[in-house]
Image (spheres, rainbow, N blue to C red):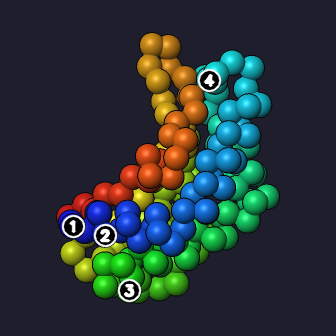
């Protein structure tokens, strides 16, 4: 298994219910749109942030990040918080970042997708395994 697969396995094994809650929140946001998508970023990010906070997801994401780093046998230099640079809620979903000894870990929970022609936001992956994207970028 490569390092990305190690992180994916750890996150899916230990935090699948949290990922499901994130996707449920995304379902609620998408249900509030008039159509199957929206052209307004503010109709995605703000309601999604609010839903994640209401379901106590935002406060639980730093533990997910800590566990992902621990799965690689590393430790974060400081306790992560539910704010940048560790956590950002974007128009595609939560993005978690950690600086490791030799790389930068970036995990995205792809809850929404940006479609083109015309540009719009639509609901993304519907299962934790499809939603979780893990990337290790060399520093």
Question: Does label 3 or label 4 sit earlier along the sequence?
Answer: 4
Question: Does label 1 or label 3 sit earlier along the sequence?
Answer: 1
Query: Which is nearer the eye, 16 or 49?
Result: 16
Which structural element holds mark 4?
Answer: strand
Quadrant in the rendering for residue 2: bottom left
Residue 89 in the image: state x and y as whole percent.
58, 52
Q: Residues within 10 Å of mark 1 (few under 14, many from 20)?
A: few
Question: Does label 3 or label 2 sit earlier along the sequence?
Answer: 2
- Which residue is identified by label 2? 6
- Which residue is identified by label 4? 37
- Which residue is identified by label 3? 75
The residue at 21%/75% (across/down) is 102
- Identify the image quadrant of the C terminus: bottom left
Q: CA distance from mark 2 to mark 4?
A: 34 Å
The residue at 55%/76% (across/down) is 63
Which structural element holds mark 3?
Answer: loop
């Amino acid at each position: 298994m490569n390092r990305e697969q190690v992180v994916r396995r750890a996150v899916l094994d230990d935090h699948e219910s949290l990922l499901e809650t994130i996707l449920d929140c995304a379902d609620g946001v998408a249900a509030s749109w008039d159509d199957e998508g929206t052209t307004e970023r503010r109709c995605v990010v703000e309601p999604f942030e609010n839903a994640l906070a209401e379901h106590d997801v935002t406060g639980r994401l730093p533990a997910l990040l800590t566990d992902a780093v621990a799965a690689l046998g590393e430790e974060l230099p400081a306790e992560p918080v539910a704010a940048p640079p560790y956590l950002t809620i974007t128009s595609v979903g939560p993005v978690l970042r950690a600086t490791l000894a030799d790389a930068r870990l970036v995990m995205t929970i792809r809850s929404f997708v940006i479609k083109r022609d015309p540009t719009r936001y639509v609901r993304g992956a519907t299962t934790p395994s499809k939603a979780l994207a893990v990337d290790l970028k060399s520093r």
